[in-house]
């Protein structure tokens, strides 16, 4: 494996059966990490392993790390990434759930509280940034994650990564949640306001000259036109070039599909990449989802096509018990697949798509 040229843009999407991460090379050895999942060893964050395999130094080459939201399948290994990427800014959504707000308070007030896994990882990330003297930054629609003038990058194209969500109204609802707690709003009403954490997710767009790539995170639809994808479409339609590639939102689910995303934000020959999700017998994308995505795309790819057995280590006593009981254990985990799109000439729209570790076209 060889790293991209300094004048080459790269989008790498990693995804096992549970988890996803996006790694972006904007040019001139400047990288951005969005979310985290683990490589096949179930310990190392996939983007860090990939950069190491390329002979790159993540501690200096990664300039920004983004947590789109705090769901388990997007945060595994995130604090490790922040620890290693010592020169990176850290961005996360300005709109939080009530539980995530408790994690925020725990950092600043040093008050112990019971947190879910997402809140616990958030706490670790913020504490790590504070301990190292680095600042965390928060994102709303139209917030710049990073930008470079044309003269700063080898390909000579102005480049930026722009957050498209959460919407201003979504942030207002977050404030309502906090206000509701202060005024002891009934639990049912609090749940209504905090429902749909995927609505808080940070969708973003990478723009390199005339090239645009839409990164959908887990953003879903809402009935309210000022939330979710409807808000993004209203705010974004007609601005900038249509995207030549998309990381499909929320693992291709029907609830994250919006017709106007395809007609107003994406090019007719768009390339789509989706990461699968599998938990307790439920899987995304479904065959119906894949058929829909394929019909709307010039080419469609999935980071993990089918489960492949991975070696899983058990304690010796457990292994002995399996053997004496004549029980056979078979792993049906997905490997952490990788879809890589390189744009050797960003303004021309030319692209080179490569598949690794079980990723497939569908």
Image (cartoon, rainbow, N blue to C red):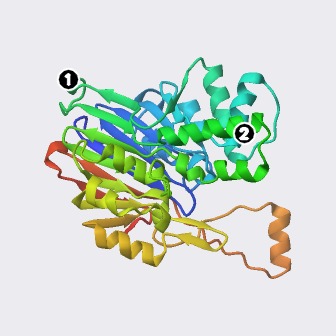
Give me the residue at 49% from left, 42% from top.
Answer: 166
Q: Mark 2 = which residue?
A: 180
Q: Residue 342 appears at what percent x and percent y?
A: 27, 49
Q: In which quarter of the image is residue 32?
A: top left
Left or right, 283 with respect to 314, comes to: left
State whether residue 324 appears in this view.
yes
Marks 2/1: CA–CA distance: 49 Å
Please tell me whether residue 311 is drawn above or below residue 88 in the rendered image. Answer: below
**Tag shown at residue 151:** 1
Quarter holding the C terminus is bottom left
Element class at badge 1:
helix
In front of the other: label 2 or label 1? 2
State whether residue 1 appears in this view.
no
Give me the residue at 78% from left, 24% from top.
Answer: 110
Pick out the residue farthest to the top: 133
**Nearer to the camera, 243 or 29:** 243
Element class at badge 2:
helix
Q: Residue 261 appears at what percent x and percent y?
A: 34, 57
Q: Earlier in the sequence, mark 2 or mark 1?
A: 1
Q: Residue 219 appears at what percent x and percent y?
A: 48, 53
């Amino acid at each position: 494996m060889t790293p991209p040229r300094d004048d080459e843009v790269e989008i790498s999407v990693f995804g096992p059966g549970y988890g996803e991460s996006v790694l972006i090379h904007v040019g001139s050895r400047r990288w951005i990490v969005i979310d985290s999942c683990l490589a096949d060893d179930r310990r190392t964050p996939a983007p860090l392993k990939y950069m190491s395999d390329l002979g790159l130094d993540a501690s200096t080459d990664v300039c920004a790390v983004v947590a789109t939201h705090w769901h388990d399948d997007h945060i595994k290994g995130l604090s490790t990434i922040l620890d290693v990427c010592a020169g990176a800014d850290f961005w996360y959504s300005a709109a939080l759930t009530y539980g995530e707000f408790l994690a925020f308070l725990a950092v600043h007030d040093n008050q112990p509280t019971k947190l879910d896994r997402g809140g616990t990882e958030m706490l670790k990330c913020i504490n790590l940034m504070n301990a190292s003297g680095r600042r965390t930054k928060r994102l709303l629609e139209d917030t710049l994650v990073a930008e470079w003038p044309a003269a700063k990058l080898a390909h000579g194209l102005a480049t930026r990564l722009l957050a498209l969500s959460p919407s201003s109204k979504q942030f207002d609802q977050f404030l309502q949640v906090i206000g509701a707690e202060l005024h002891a709003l009934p639990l049912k009403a609090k749940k209504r306001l905090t429902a749909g954490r995927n609505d808080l997710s940070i969708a973003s767009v990478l723009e390199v000259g005339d090239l645009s790539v839409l990164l959908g995170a887990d953003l879903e639809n809402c009935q309210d036109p000022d939330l979710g994808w409807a808000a993004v479409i209203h705010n974004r339609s007609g601005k900038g070039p249509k995207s030549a590639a998309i990381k499909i939102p929320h693992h291709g689910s029907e609830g994250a599909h919006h017709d106007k995303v395809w007609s107003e934000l994406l090019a007719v020959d768009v390339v789509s990449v989706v990461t699968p999700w599998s938990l307790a017998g439920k899987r995304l994308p479904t065959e119906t989802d894949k058929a829909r995505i394929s019909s709307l795309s010039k080419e469609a790819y999935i980071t993990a096509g089918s489960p492949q057995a991975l070696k899983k280590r058990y304690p010796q006593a457990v292994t002995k018990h399996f053997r004496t009981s004549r029980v056979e254990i078979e792993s049906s985990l997905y490997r952490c697949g990788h879809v890589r799109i390189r744009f050797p000439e960003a303004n021309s729209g030319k692209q080179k798509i490569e598949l690794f570790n079980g990723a497939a076209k569908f």
